Image (cartoon, grey):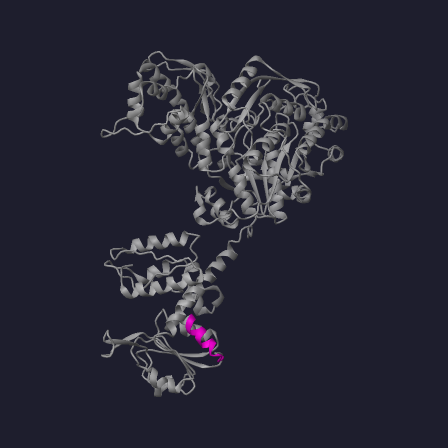
Amino acid sequence: VGNRDDSNLYINMKLKAAAEIGITANHIKLPNTATEADVLKCIASLNADPAVHGFIVQLPLDSNNPINTEKITNAVAPEKDVDGLSSINAGKLSRGDLGDCFIPCTPKGCMELIRQTGVQVAGKRAVVIGRSKIVGAPMHDLLLWNNATVTTCHSKTSTLAEEVGKADILVVAAGRAEMVKGEWIKPGAIVIDCGINHVPDSTKASGKRVVGDVAYSSAKEKASFITPVPGGVGPMTVAMLMQSTVESAQRFLEKFQPGKWTIQYNQLTLKMPVPSDIEISQSCMPKPIDQVAKEVGLFPDEVELYGQTKAKVQLSVLKRLKDQPDGKYVVVTGITPTPLGEGKSTTTVGLVQALGAHLHQNVFACVRQPSQGPTFGIKGGAAGGGYCQVVPMEEFNLHLTGDIHAITAANNLVAAAIDARMFHELTQSDQALYNRLVPSINGVRKFSDIQIRRLQKLGINKTDPMALTKEEINLFVRLDIDPGTITWQRVLDTNDRFLRKITIGQSVTEKGFSRMAQFDITVSSEIMAVLALADGLDDMKKRFGRMVVASSKKGQPVTADDLGVTGALAVLMKDAVKPNLMQTLEGTPVFVHAGPFANIAHGNSSVLADKIALKLVGKDGFVVTEAGFGADIGMEKFFNIKCRYSGLRPHVVVLVATVRALKMHGGGPTVTAGVPLPKEYTEENLQLVAKGCSNLNKQIQNARMFGVPVVVAVNAFKTDTKAELALVVQHAKEAGAFDAVECTHWAEGGKGALALARAVQRASQAPSNFRFLYNVELPIVDKIRLIAQQVYGARDIELLPEAEEKVALYTKQGFGNLPICMAKTHLSLSHDPEQKGAPSGFVLPIRDIRASVGAGFLYPLVGTV
């Protein structure tokens, strides 16, 4: 603070020393007008910066404003207080906790000088002259805890010469020139002179010279060792500052070693019968989320708290951990489910609770955020169930941190921009449109970056708005959208059936330009799919720009970039791109991020959450994520779409099966949500189970087709018999599963998934020869056929006329090399939800094909979906 010459001299000495030994050091200069609040703000910033391992506040503070020095020194975080001046470090020193504090640099340097004499401190009589907080008081404590008998003298000591004469070790820091005379000193004593004083000297150009607190010329005749002034304690003080900074960095690296977790798990109190999910969730006391963040190795500045139980994690953690190896990557999927679901989310949570709280492995769950549509419908939430939940479940299932609301806003901005653009193009001349799009501000027109991109797309290589011809202005301002080709709909995260088909533009202000439109559910928006597949804010913005919303009347794709809204979308989504941190009932960490549907989208949580989690768990840890619906849908898309874009390679597939679903596939009665199960599902029936295992066998084959070991988790319900469960395990192993285990995690938490966790550990050590099903360069039809035949068991595919037209259109528009995201029923391997088991020989009808170019896939509509 300020600009004192002596302070600048000392700082420059320290900067030079740091540079010589490879420490990156910076001098932060505050003006002499700085207030106490300014200094405290600067200190708080340094305290929070993980890139700073230590800092000092140069004293005295040269400010025109009153500043409490004690308050300033105590504001420095003790773990970064390499000057050792905070009350916490001073207190630890006075108590003898020398290994857990920073010692002020001058006393520390004095001790090092004494050690280098070879004289043992223990048992010696030491005298310290001076009692300042910087030198005298800590010097006394340091000598005392090194087992010397210590006397502190000061300006009020009446027998100073007598006390000095008793000292085997004398440390002087009184600030008075040559006050200690040579004749006072005990013969053979060690003398450390910390004083810096100026006395008149006519022989010097400056008219003065530097002397210490000890009369050096006479004292050196009596002392066995003595430090000169200058050149004695000063350089050693700087050296000790460097040493403390290195020690601080070492402590930091030990404490925040990637993959080294010290985590507190929560003990479950199990009840029978198992209470409702909400009762269990609300009976749990979650850890403060900042504690969870700290436990998994996140720094304070990498975490944005949303209350006590939720936080967002900055993407900068990926840059910090870029050189760290990834952990093991596990995907949880399932057999073809009943309408009730078979417990993939519950199994995902149970598995991570078992790996973490019971086997003490670093483990993260990465799951999707649920939509309010199913949450308020028959299906309910997606936090898991029983004693395997993400908590608080009501926070998880509803607003969370507002990501879905941000997607709603961004999606509807695009929808509004489409209709507004069509309206203005229909009601204005080219020049009027141009004046609105490129307005003159203070007599100057200027293209924005996004407008430059549009000009380049049109082949117009001009940057001066005044240089465009009338023809070029016409091309620039008119998107000429064909209303019949608009694929972008408005969204709302609620099942409001009366908005499924609407007429828009009925106000008189729209001048009769109305059209039929619709509302979709928010999580079906392409923006959600983009969020899930993006690998950063920049990538997300580029994907937004590529989103195709319609075609022009000439058949050219119209994108969000053409509409000029890409930057606005990125601003609306800048917080949503950060994964959300939560925890399970047993205190293991969870990332909740993105929630694309598994039919018209790929049905997986975000790439970013998985990448961050894989770095945080370390090479021996596990990241468990879940793919929506059955293995033929969510898992296939996880492999062929998500892993293709992320570059990540899975180690294990966990395939969830239930006796209930297998009985359905074996010919059991229809299972209807909200209706009691027929007796076939609540009584033992080994014949139905055995017949239904055809579906289990096919889904095991589907997973193994990608070269990844499969562990079958048989999710046990209370109505299942031991014989039924054993039969499923047997069939799974015979079908080629690496292992198959019975799980009771719904009722027992992580304990009930221990066998599964151990099987996953073993499988993760087995060879994984992951491969994609198809090359994206294949024609669109060939890619669809490969999925239909290899994954679903179809004999062939049939493209209906609309689908054939789309194949030709997307190939012409340059989208033919995108991956395929099949939109079909999740209730059967085929297109017909009534066909259970493992149907074969059928022809798969492709009704239409649509493009999510920004997300990066084409999605064929299969059957009646």
**Quick check: can you spot residue 276?**
no
Q: In this image, 98 relative to 214: left or right?
A: right
Asked if 346 appears above or below 184 in the picture, the reply is above
User: Is residue 376 rendered to the left or right of residue 467?
Assistant: right
Compared with residue 663, is residue 212 higher up or lower down, i.e. above or below?
below
Q: Over which residues does the magenta segment extend?
A: 108-120
User: Residue 112 lies in magenta, yes or no?
Assistant: yes
Percent of width and height locating residue 376: 51, 27
Q: Nearest the camera: 615 or 200? A: 200
Q: Is residue 69 left or right of residue 552?
A: left
Residue drawn at (68%, 34%) of the image? 704
**Quarter of the image that includes the C terminus:** top right
Number of labels in the image equals 0
Q: Is residue 51 left or right of residue 765?
A: left
Is most of the magenta stretch helix, strand or loop?
A: helix
Instruction: Measuring from the top left, give residue 436's x and y in whole percent.
Output: 29, 23
Residue 682, quarter of picture: top right
> Residue 99 versus residue 855: which sits nearer the camera?
855
Specify whether residue 139 is in view: yes
Task: Single out the residue that lies furthest toward the top.
Answer: 512
Residue 402 counted in the magenta span: no
Which quarter of the image is occupied by the N terminus? bottom left
* Position in image of residue 653 (x %, y %): 65, 37
Residue 511 drawn at (x, y percent):
33, 12
